Amino acid sequence: MSKDLPEPGELVVVTIKEVKNFGATAKLEEYPGHEGFIHIAEVATGWVKHIRDYLREGQKTVCKVLSIDTNRGNVELSLKRVNDHQKREKISEWKNEQKASKLLEIVAKQLKKSVEECEAEFADELRQRYGNLYAAFEDASASENWFPEINEKWKTVFVKIARENVVLPYVKIGGTIEAYSLAPNGIQMIKSTIDPGDEATVGIQYAGAPRYIVTVTDKDYKTAEDTLKRVVQRIMDNAKKNGVVAEFVRK
């Protein structure tokens, strides 16, 4: 669930509400009912002669939170301390969360529940697991067997809505590794074995003893297949070294 106010240092999406000679007020899109202020000194590096060369009413942009007066609710913002890359990333993240909110409304309607009930039942947990709700919808759309340990009705509806509405910019492949060890320190040896190394596109999820789900998310199937083959070989080599019995089953 969202906080009442942002924190200093946080990047926020804003809509410029009013532009004056000394600065501009802006609506905080992720914090309904709250506004911030961008002083002219925080609009751009160097001297700003005409603030309207940089800002206009109705414009959406990204600012950095400088400070907050919690008693008054005043939020001081900076435009010049956000680079173009940060701006693109934040706008994309915000748009995706807007989409996720709409998709959650559809899920709630099909489950005949309120959005608040869905938030409490599963959406908050998905945010904690994935970082944001849209990432959960993406994974549900991409995975052939999303969250195999979950059997609740909401999962079926969630996956259906995800696959109908989320267009993925990547492919996702994977499989299951079963690992056993009878050694006294078997659990530690298995954890040491199930190690993807430095592969940034690989995810490993514990699915209940003795199963681990391995997924590779990448731009195309060939790259993903190469990565999966490399990671599985690494795990099998680790298993042999650690005295762990391991088997990989492709999904």
Image (cartoon, helix red, strand yellow):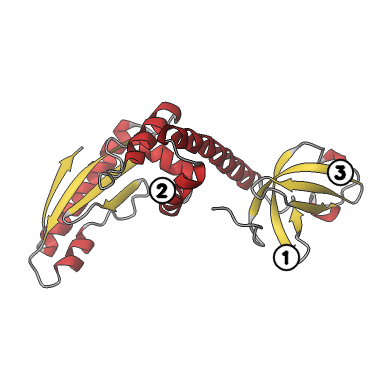
Give the camera-side residue of 142 and 122.
122
Q: Which residue is mark 2?
A: 122
Mark-to-mark CA distance, 1 and 3: 24 Å
Residue 88 appearing in the image: yes
Mark 2 or mark 1, whichever is nearer to me: 2
Disc 2 to disc 3, C-alpha distance: 41 Å
Q: Which residue lies under the disc numbered 3?
A: 19
Q: Residue at x 14, y 58 (%)?
A: 239
Q: What kind of residue is marked 1? A: Thr
Residue at image position (18%, 49%) is 177
Q: Is residue 241 left or right of residue 159?
A: left
* Quadrant assignment, res 55: top right
Q: Is residue 141 visible?
A: no
Which is more N-terminal, label 3 or label 1?
A: 3
Would you identify the image quadrant in which residue 42 lies? Answer: bottom right
Image location (x, y in percent) of residue 5: 66, 58
Name the residue tied to disc 1: 70
Q: Position of residue 121 (x, y in %)?
A: 41, 49
118 lies left or right of 238: right
Considering only vertical position in the picture, is 13 above or below 10? above
**Badge 3 element:** strand
Question: Local crowd at mark 3 within 10 Å, few (<14), some, or many (≥20)?
Answer: some
Query: Image check: 43 left or right of 6?
Result: right
Which mark is nearer the camera, 2 or 3? Answer: 2
Q: Please state which amino acid type lies under the numbered disc 2.
A: Phe
Image location of residue 224, percent across then percent down: 31, 37
Q: Secondary structure at mark 2?
A: helix
Instruction: Answer whether labels 1 and 3 touch (C-beta < 8 Å).
Output: no
User: Which residue is nearer to you in this view: 120 or 164?
Assistant: 120
Q: Residues within 10 Å of mark 1 (few under 14, many from 20)?
A: few
Question: In the rendered structure, are the residues bearing label 2 and label 1 in contact, judged by CB atoms less than 8 Å apart?
Answer: no
